[in-house]
Amino acid sequence: MTPSLQVVIPLFPGFTALDGVGPYEILQRLPSVEVTFIAHRRGEVRNDRGSLGMAADATFDEFPRPDVVVFPGGPGTRDLQSDQTVLAWIRQAHTTTRLTTSVCTGSLVLGAAGLLTGLAATTHWACTAELAAHGAVPTPQRVVELPEHRIITSAGVSAGIDMALRLVELLVDRTAAEAVQLMVEYDPRPPFDAGSPATAGAAARSRAAEYRDRRDGSGGPRS
Amino acid sequence: MTPSLQVVIPLFPGFTALDGVGPYEILQRLPSVEVTFIAHRRGEVRNDRGSLGMAADATFDEFPRPDVVVFPGGPGTRDLQSDQTVLAWIRQAHTTTRLTTSVCTGSLVLGAAGLLTGLAATTHWACTAELAAHGAVPTPQRVVELPEHRIITSAGVSAGIDMALRLVELLVDRTAAEAVQLMVEYDPRPPFDAGSPATAGAAARSRAAEYRDRRDGSGGPRS
């Protein structure tokens, strides 16, 4: 038996569900991997809209030395930037991980912990200034790999799926990654070409801003 | 205020998480939509591997007339094919929905309820024979739309994201769909081209079969 690789995905109030579940669905297909959702406390954690609850099955304390961290994003990351428990955990965990990774604004937490100072990293397209404020060098790529630092960051929300396939290649091999891609039938056919600020038209950009405002009248972070 | 559209996503033991969360993440971005996860009972429901728990916030009984149904797949759909409560619910709900939809093997439940008899429909690539057994006509497309029947089925797991963008166009308009695509930065860049049986090589197909066997020694359904 191959020893299991321990992958942890932190949950926190205001996380974005697909940021975590996209990579989860890829990584959980590997027999040699155990993925665990962790949080401050075991039990249900609500997402950014409050209409999705997911179970944290363990606490940060129970996983001091995971093999891989996948830190999801969401508006709730902003509170984590000053959460000393989380920041100390990720700093310590990173000393022994094979890979420390993030999706979307999960990179802001890595940044707040000091892991990205002076390094290339990515995040949601709307949040690059916040990433730069942590001393990182925002890099407009879907996935930014820093093998010498064992850090991989990915862009907004759905980018975590692409990153996770690459993680499978790094953790197992390319055939494993292709097998998982086949199992989840990841042969994307977006009906529109509006997935980045470079391709979305003015009307889509304007509507996106309107939707974010209507969802969150407070003007707070939305991604 | 625009009245909210009620979208429901059924949960059941052995569901595949991304099947539900992919469309959820797209649809929940619309201020005019409320998405609710429903199940036989309120409370936590475990996925196909058991390592992810999601909360059902309402029961089937509480949503007899949803505007939209998104039925996810997973090994657990096989039990639902003879679950008279679920079959009666979907049959009745479909009489008044704007759209009744499925992801992956969710279409087997629609089929078991008699909604797909004689109709073109899709499912996970590995499960077309099971779909045909319900009298549907398996159609190897990522998304199959039957506007005259108010039914849309989508292929395996990740195909629900593509379908959901199309749902947004149908329920609101194309600009809304493009805005959501931008918000979730859905600009896919799979690192490999193995997302369908037509593109995956023999090694990937063989490894996928091996992983499914190792996950489920019982030889039962895996998708």
Image (spheres, coloured by chain):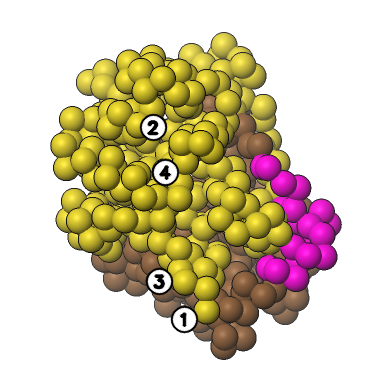
Chain colours: A brown, B yellow
Q: Chain of mark 2?
A: B
Answer with left or right where residue B199 lies relative to residue B69.
right
What percent of the width, then of the height, locates residue B102?
Answer: 42, 39
Q: CA distance from mark 3 to mark 1?
A: 24 Å
Q: CA distance from mark 2 to mark 4?
A: 10 Å
Label 1, on which residue? A84
Tag nearer the camera, 3 or 1: 3
Callout 4 environment at 10 Å: few (<14), some (14 to 19), or many (20+)? Answer: many
Q: Position of residue A196 (x, y in %)?
A: 75, 56
Q: Is residue B197 above or below residue B109?
A: above
Disc nearer the start of the sequence (2/4) = 4
Q: Which region is colored magenta?
A: A190-208
- Which label sits on residue B100? 4
The disc label shown at residue A50, or none: 3
Q: Is residue B36 visible?
A: yes
Work out whether residue A32 or residue A44 is closer to the camera in this orientation and state it.
A44
Picture quadrant where residue B134 is located: top left
In this view, the mark in front (1 or 4): 4
Q: Are marks 2 and 4 on the same chain?
A: yes
Q: CA distance from mark 1 to mark 4?
A: 46 Å
Q: Mark 3 is on which residue type? A: Gly
Looking at the rendered image, the disc whose residue lies closer to the viewer, 3 or 4, is: 4
Q: Which mark is residue B107?
A: 2
User: From the viewer's perspective, is A99 left or right of A12?
Assistant: right
- Within the image, what quadrant is residue B81 found in? top left
What crowding class fits label 2: few (fewer than 14 Cα within 10 Å), some (14-19), or many (20 or more)?
A: many
Q: At 39% from the left edge and 32% from the top edge, which residue is drawn?
A: B107
Amino acid, disc 4: Thr
